[in-house]
Image (spheres, grey):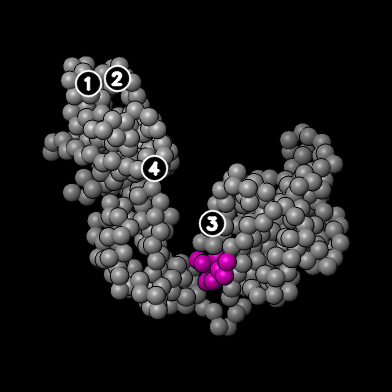
């Protein structure tokens, strides 16, 4: 079975907002055995969206549309779907009841614009939205089953998981030629510490264009994902995944959606270690990543943003003399930050990092993107210097990931 993913919104077309929905939908579809033909991003134009839905309905089995179901006049997906189906919009009793219950629970009165969200194409089904006003819509156009979801990320993700994926599983189960199980179609091996070019060299034969399963890479903030595509062949995908892990070794930190912080948290729990962090140029990003992990409070003792020189002295125990003689961006200061935060908190591991995120502040000897890292534990202190390229946000992301990976590798031994 094949699918087309449509993302609707002027803000996406104009570049004001990044379309993250298409990747989330494609991953979910791949996990239940659906091959995604393409993604399309369209303006809130009724005719253009209707044309895209009709075209997708002629060539795919599943069409997932995100966005354009809100209460304002520029939310036109429901009108476009009705045009593609060749039917009028009419008040849907389930959608109306949902809106009334939503308003009643909050002591509000529905506005006329909100009532627009009860209008669905004749013959369409309403999909439950437990956390928002806009119900989703399920209908048939051409040969395809069409699912329309709100563009609000939390609502879209929950409805995708609770409404769309179960419905698609039922569709897949009814297809005699498709026996794929969840997770058997696309498998992702996540790595950090090797450049994408090195990963490509080590996996060159697996990535040959005419080979099956297909193997490809994608990189973001230093994380190199290896995607293995093996439609209908879970055992072959598993064999390739094992080979990728063997060739890339300790650079592999997880699979699927696992993050570096998840890997670090799991190792802290396994080794029964605690961690404290003193970070400067990342501005709390290392700590923010870690606290995304449920249960991290058992292993994260403390995290401080020692941004100014005075804070490095006060919060991380760095000697003023050291900053004056070596500079705030130096191996000596990074070591002192890691050792100081470990000593003050009593954590098993102290992590320190200091650098220049830019866009200004660089020198010929310490260009923008220079970051010093240090890790202190009972075995001693190790330090490393990296120079990252990119804008301020990218440098901070790379540095935070690098710091987490330093802790991961130390915990691995």
- The residue indicated by pointer 4 is 390
- The residue indicated by pointer 3 is 24
* Left or right: 46 as drawn, with respect to 250: right
- Mark 4 or 3 closer to N-term? 3
Q: Residue at 61% x, 67% y: name it.
A: 4
How far, Cα to Cα, is label 4 from label 1?
26 Å
Structural crowding at the residue carrying mark 3, measured as other residues with C-alpha within 10 Å and reported as few (<14), some (14–19) or many (≥20): few
Residue 388 lies in the magenta-colored region = no
Q: Residue at 67% x, 56% y: name it.
A: 42
The answer to whether marks 2 and 1 mark residues whose Cβ atoms lie closer than 8 Å is yes
- Mark 1 or 3 closer to N-term? 3
Look at the image and tell me whether residue 51 can be seen.
yes
Front residue of 411/78: it is: 78
Q: Secondary structure at mark 4?
A: loop
Which region of the structure is painted magenta?
Answer: 29-38
Front residue of 381/184: it is: 381
* Left or right: 370 as drawn, with respect to 104: left
> Residue lying farthest front?
364
- The residue indicated by pointer 1 is 323
The answer to whether marks 4 and 1 mark residues whose Cβ atoms lie closer than 8 Å is no
How far, Cα to Cα, is label 4 from label 3?
26 Å
Mark 3 or mark 2: which is in front? 2
Mark 2 or mark 4: which is in front? 4
The answer to whether marks 3 and 2 mark residues whose Cβ atoms lie closer than 8 Å is no
- Mark 4 or 1 closer to N-term? 1
- The residue indicated by pointer 2 is 309
* Left or right: 17 as drawn, with respect to 98: left
- Mark 2 or 4 closer to N-term? 2
């Amino acid at each position: 079975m094949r699918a087309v993913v449509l993302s609707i919104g002027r803000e996406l077309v104009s570049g004001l907002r990044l379309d993250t929905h298409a990747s989330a939908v494609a991953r979910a579809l791949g996990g239940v055995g659906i091959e995604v033909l393409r993604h399309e991003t369209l303006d809130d134009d009724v005719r253009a969206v209707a044309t895209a839905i009709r075209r997708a309905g002629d060539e795919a089995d599943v069409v997932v549309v995100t966005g354009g179901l809100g209460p304002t006049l520029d939310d036109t997906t429901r009108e476009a779907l009705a045009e593609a189906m060749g039917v009028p919009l009419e008040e849907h009793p389930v959608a109306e009841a949902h809106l009334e219950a939503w308003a009643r629970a909050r002591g509000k009165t529905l506005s006329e614009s909100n009532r627009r969200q009860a209008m669905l194409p004749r013959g369409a089904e309403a999909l439950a939205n437990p956390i928002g006003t806009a119900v989703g819509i399920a209908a048939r156009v051409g040969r395809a089953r069409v699912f329309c979801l709100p563009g609000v990320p939390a609502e879209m993700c929950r409805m995708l998981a609770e409404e769309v994926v179960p419905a698609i599983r039922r569709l897949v189960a009814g297809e005699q030629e498709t026996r794929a199980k969840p997770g058997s179609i696309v498998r992702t091996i996540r790595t950090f510490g090797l450049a994408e070019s090195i990963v490509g060299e080590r996996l060159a034969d697996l990535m040959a264009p005419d080979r099956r399963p297909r193997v490809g890479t994608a990189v973001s903030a230093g994380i190199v994902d290896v995607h293995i595509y093996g439609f209908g062949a879970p055992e072959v995908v598993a064999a390739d995944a094992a080979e990728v892990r063997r060739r890339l070794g300790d650079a592999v930190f997880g699979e699927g959606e696992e993050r570096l912080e998840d890997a670090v948290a799991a190792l802290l729990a396994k080794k029964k270690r605690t961690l404290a962090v003193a970070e400067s140029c990342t501005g709390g990003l290392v700590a923010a990543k870690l606290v995304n992990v449920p249960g991290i409070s058992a292993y994260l003792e403390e995290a401080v943003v020692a941004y100014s020189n005075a804070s490095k002295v006060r919060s991380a125990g760095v000697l003023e003399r050291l900053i004056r003689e070596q500079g705030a961006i130096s191996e000596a200061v990074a070591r002192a930050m890691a050792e100081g935060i470990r000593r003050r908190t009593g954590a098993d591991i102290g992590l320190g990092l200091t650098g220049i995120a830019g866009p200004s502040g660089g020198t010929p000897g310490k260009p923008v993107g220079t970051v010093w890292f240090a890790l202190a534990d009972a075995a001693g202190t190790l330090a490393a210097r990296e120079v990252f390229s990119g804008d301020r946000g990218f440098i901070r992301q790379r540095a935070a990931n690098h710091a987490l990976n330093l802790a991961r590798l130390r915990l691995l031994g």
